[in-house]
Image (cartoon, rainbow, N blue to C red):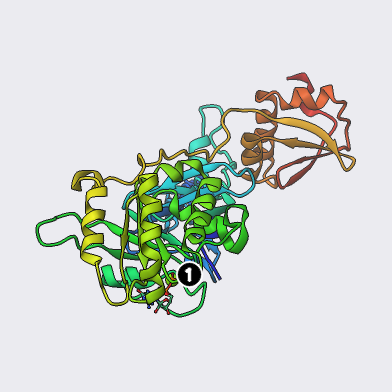
Amino acid sequence: MFFDSVRVWIRAGDGGDGAATFRHEAHVPRGGPDGGDGGRGGSIYLTVDPGETSLRDYRHKHHFKATAGGRGSGQKKHGKAGDDLILKVPPGTGVFDESSADLLGDLVASGQTLMVGRGGRGGLGNVHFATSTHQAPKHAQNGEPGEERQIRLELRLLADVGLVGLPNAGKSTLLAALTAARPKIADYPFTTLEPNLGVLDLGDEDSRRPTIADVPGLIEGASSGAGLGHAFLRHVERTRVLVHVVDGSDRDPEWSYSVIRDELGAHDPALLTKPLLVAFNKMDRLVAAEAWPAFRNARAAQGVAAVAISAETGANLAELRERLSKLLPSAEELAEPPEPAGIVVHRLESAGNTFTVAREDGMLVVHGHRIERLAAQTNFDVEESAERFQEDLIRLGIDHELRRQGVAPGDTVRIGGSELEWESDAWDER
Ligand SMILES: Nc1nc2c(ncn2[C@@H]2O[C@H](COP(=O)(O)OP(=O)(O)OP(=O)(O)O)[C@@H](O)[C@H]2O)c(=O)[nH]1
Ligand SMILES: [Mg+2]
């Protein structure tokens, strides 16, 4: 299986509840409020670790939860903060919100970090609610729920050089010949299912250390999805230079060459303008040596650079390395990610104070980020807290809208996870 696109469930930690406690003092029947705040819930982050090259780690584990904040307690003690959870991803990981398909972030540079689930704020303890006219508040806030979402991680490998070609052309053999990488090599197509990465040694005089990736074999129709084509082609998008490996011993190397060019172009025409070097491989075989002159002339006529090699015997690899080094940019440029580092878009909270009120399943349902959070933070068993919530409904204009839609005593109103009964309106006179 190929694991460069995975779905992951994220659940940040809930904030701890604030406490509603009162000081105990000798001779004082009831001291002032001293309930501390709940701790913040742990958040979840993704961070780029250059040591990672695939999303394989997410193959078996795809639920991640950060810990909740502790509850506040008496004597103004705050609850403990939940632990953050930091998940490692390889460079080139795009992060999408699964439900909206929005790009949340494009993680390319080492150490780049993106918060994907915000921990809930801790609830405020009752000390915060004392006023000169109300000195013994029983109200304390519940912790805010941690953010929960489903995200999709999509890897677009970041390599300087991409080896493309039909299956069995000798891409992995070439990668092994040019670098210290030891990919699996075998005499059947689709040996490589996940890209392998190596670091290219350009010789003692050259300080550049470009990375080279062996992209799984592409086949005719790859650009419309054949043979996991989309997934494989995605990896080519961000490489700087393409080395197109053609099996010179193929029955028709000219077809082998053009079918891949067609697929690259159909996937994204920009791929056809990337610097290109064609490696005509398996020259140790007689058929290849015989086919080379015609192939070479055809490329020359197109102005395409081609070099005849044998990845297996190592013949002419020095020339290939030399040509490749000329196509690669300077050391400074190589140090930068292949694309301007993706701007991290962070759309965790829908902005503003918008809400909707609608009838669903015979009840009135209020949707709105802000009010749903407030409902979750309210302990409706405490009358004082419930009253505060009613004030919030008025303040945010939701009370008005409910009345406009004809809410009547006894009606059920659902807000987030809470179902409330509309009582004969005590706050009518307000
Ligand atoms: N004679 C000869 N055989 C080669 C040469 N290069 C590769 N091969 C053989 O070709 C077969 C395929 O090589 P791989 O390197 O696995 O090919 P690949 O392009 O990575 O194939 P996929 O991963 O399936 O796409 C293996 O049996 C290699 O030993 C070469 O220069 N000469
Ligand atoms: Mg291979």
Residue toward you, 103 or 409: 103
Q: In the displayed structure, does residue 106 sit left or right of residue 367?
A: left
322 sits to left or right of 65: left
Q: Tell which of 252 and 76 is nearer to you.
A: 252
Q: Quadrant of the N terminus?
A: bottom right
Q: Is residue 10 left or right of residue 176?
A: right
Q: How many marks?
A: 1
The answer to whether residue 71 shows anywhere in this view is no
Quadrant of the frame with the C terminus: top right
Q: Is residue 77 above or below residue 420?
A: below
Q: Amino acid at mark 1?
A: Asp
| Left or right of 180, for residue 271 | right
Q: Measured along the vertical axis of the image, is residue 334 above or below residue 204?
A: above
Secondary structure beneath label 1: loop
46 to 269, vertically: above or below: below
* Residue at x-position 89% and y-position 30%: 408
- Residue drawn 44% across the image and 62% down it: 215
Depth check, front residue: 6 or 333: 333
Q: Is mark 1 within 8 Å of ligand 1?
A: no
Mark 1 nearby-residue class (10 Å; few <14, some 14–19, many ≥20): some
Q: Tell me which image quadrant ligand 2 sits in.
A: bottom left
Q: Is residue 351 visible?
A: yes
At a point 46% along the width and 80% down the height, the residue shown is 187
User: Mark 1 — residue?
Assistant: 250
Front position in the image: 147 or 143:
147
| Residue drawn at point x = 77 percent, y = 31 percent | 357
Q: Indicate the position of residue 258 as horizontal and vertical percent values.
A: 50, 54
Find residue 199 and report its horizontal and vertical position in percent. 26, 63
